[in-house]
Image (spheres, helix red, strand yellow):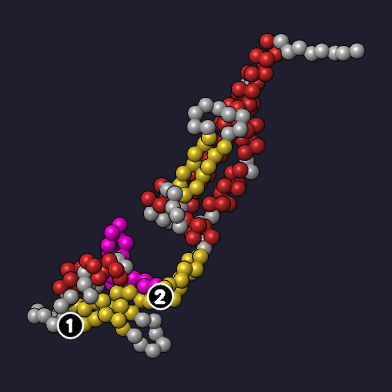
């Protein structure tokens, strides 16, 4: 005995309708989870600059329409993002030169590094004391009253010629300190946010499916 089943056009139409519903619910669920991860991630990055926070992205595939197998990619468009996610120790070659409070501001409102300082301001002089971290200092010519305040960029540029004429006392002001390495601790945990939202995906999918079938 042979039994033969034939699928009629009505059945195919019904299955197509159900498949579209499944795809719609799945895509909506993944889209909501991706948006939630991005939103929570940006709040986690609130302590960083606005530009850094805006580097958080979430992209859902396919880009258009619904799919039975939707996917999302979330992350940070910052090459060194993992340093703050996991923490890291960065070593110098042989030293890292960290700006002190007196170092002037450069591009982006950040304090200048030694290279930028020499290029735009003036000469740096080494200060080495046994048992203490080495320093790079700038020459400043200033009055006794002005010495009580942090040196301005104009004052630093004026002091680039310590042997020149001008009023005021010539002195060295430390701009940078040299250290062999810097340990940056974990500052955020985007991985935890992704995992927590991913764990809610099944529940969100059921909500989307129920809403579609109401």
- How would you rate the neighbour count of disc 1 (Cα within 10 Å): few for under 14, some for 14-19, many for 20 or more? some
The C terminus sits in image quarter: top right
Select label 1 or label 2 by which is in front.
2
Residue at far front of view: 2
Q: Position of residue 171 (x, y in %)?
A: 21, 82
Distance between mark 1 and mark 2 Cα atoms: 28 Å
* Residue lying at the far bottom of the rendered structure: 130
Query: Residue at position x 23%, y 75% from top?
Result: 123
Instruction: Determine the residue positioned at 21% across, 78% down.
Output: 139
Q: Secondary structure at mark 2?
A: strand
Judge by depth and name the residue closer to the eye, 40 or 112: 112
**Residue 32 visible, this orientation:** no
Residue range (magenta): 96-111
Which disc, if any, is residue 95? 2
Tags 1 and 2 in contact by the CB under 8 Å rule?
no
Residue that carries the numbered disc 1 in the rendered image: 170
């Amino acid at each position: 005995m042979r039994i033969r089943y034939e699928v009629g056009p009505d059945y195919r139409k019904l299955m197509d309708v159900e498949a579209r519903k499944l795809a719609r619910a799945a895509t909506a669920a993944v889209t909501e989870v991706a948006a939630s991860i991005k939103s929570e991630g940006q709040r986690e990055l609130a302590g960083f600059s606005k530009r850094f926070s805006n580097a958080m992205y979430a992209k859902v595939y396919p880009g258009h329409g619904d799919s039975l197998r939707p996917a999302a990619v979330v992350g940070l468009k910052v090459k060194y993002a993992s340093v703050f996610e996991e923490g890291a120790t960065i070593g110098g070659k042989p030293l890292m030169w960290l700006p002190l409070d007196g170092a002037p501001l450069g591009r982006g409102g950040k304090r200048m590094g030694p290279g930028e300082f020499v290029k735009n301001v003036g000469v740096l002089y080494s200060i080495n004391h046994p048992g203490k971290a080495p320093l790079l200092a700038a020459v400043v010519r200033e009055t006794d009253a002005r010495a009580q305040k942090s040196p301005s960029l104009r004052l630093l540029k004026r002091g680039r010629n310590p042997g020149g004429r001008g009023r005021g006392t010539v002195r060295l002001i430390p701009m940078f300190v040299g250290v062999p390495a810097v340990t940056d601790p974990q500052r955020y945990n985007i991985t935890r946010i992704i995992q927590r939202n991913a764990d809610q995906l099944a529940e969100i999918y059921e909500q989307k499916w129920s809403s579609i079938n109401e």
